[in-house]
Image (cartoon, helix red, strand yellow):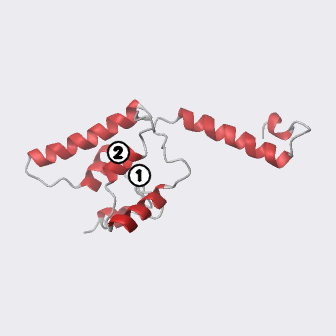
């Protein structure tokens, strides 16, 4: 632990000081991320659950990516996020031009990269790659 965290100002409770220090560190880490999400404290899984509840269907992964990477002022969080989204749109258009139906989850995975075995990037906790893409043996 750094020295600053161990020595709070006398007027601040040490546990509150520690939370403030951690919060500042988290802000700094998020500012360094090229793919910071804009959902605030709303987890992707909660948003996904609400969408399914309202519409009766799984939210589109490409549009979910956009929703969580565009700021309130309609600007992308980074050029990297915009490039990834544009890549997903282009990949979908290419599939259509080849007479194929674009599989949006597969396009998301193709552009963003391979998923971890226990999660699907952009879908929140609780959604595994097997849930979205099926088992590797199928």
Horizontal and vertical percent for residue 107? 26, 50
Question: Which residue occupies 37% across, 61% down?
Answer: 129
Q: Which residue: 24% across, 42% down?
A: 89
- Can you say whether 53 is above or below 16 in the image? below
Which circle marks residue 92 in the picture? none
Q: Residue beneath label 2, please?
A: 112
Foreground mark, 2 or 1, reads 1
Most foreground residue, 120 or 18: 18
Expressed as whole percent of the image width and height from the top left, the position of residue 77 reads 44, 35
Using the rendered view, name the quadrant where residue 81 is placed: top left
Residue at label 1?
122
Q: Quadrant of the C terminus?
A: bottom left
Residue 132, image quadrant: bottom left
- Label 1: how many Cα within 10 Å (few below 14, some 14–19, many 20+): many
How many angstroms separate mark 2 from mark 1 (CA)? 10 Å
- Quarter assignment of residue 23: top right
Contact (Cβ within 8 Å) of mark 2 with mark 1 = yes
Q: Nearer the viewer, residue 95 or 13?
A: 13
N-terminal-most mark, 2 or 1: 2
Quadrant of image for the N terminus: top right
Q: Say whether residue 117 is left or right of residue 60.
A: right
Measured as percent of width and height from the top left, residue 119 is found at 43, 59
Q: Residue at x 33, y 68 (%)?
A: 56
On screen, 137 above or below 117? below
């Amino acid at each position: 632990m750094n020295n600053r965290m161990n020595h709070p100002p006398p007027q601040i409770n040490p546990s509150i000081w520690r939370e403030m220090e951690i919060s500042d560190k988290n802000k700094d880490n998020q500012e360094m991320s090229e793919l910071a999400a804009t959902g605030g404290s709303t987890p992707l899984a909660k948003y996904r659950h609400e969408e399914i509840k309202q519409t009766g269907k799984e939210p589109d992964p490409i549009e979910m990516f956009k929703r969580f990477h565009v700021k309130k002022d309609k600007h992308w969080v980074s050029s990297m996020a915009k490039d990834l989204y544009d890549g997903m749109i282009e990949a979908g258009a290419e599939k259509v031009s080849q007479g194929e139906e674009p599989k949006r989850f597969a396009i998301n995975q193709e552009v963003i990269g391979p998923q971890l075995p226990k999660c699907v990037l952009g879908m929140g906790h609780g959604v595994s790659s097997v849930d979205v893409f099926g088992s590797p043996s199928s």
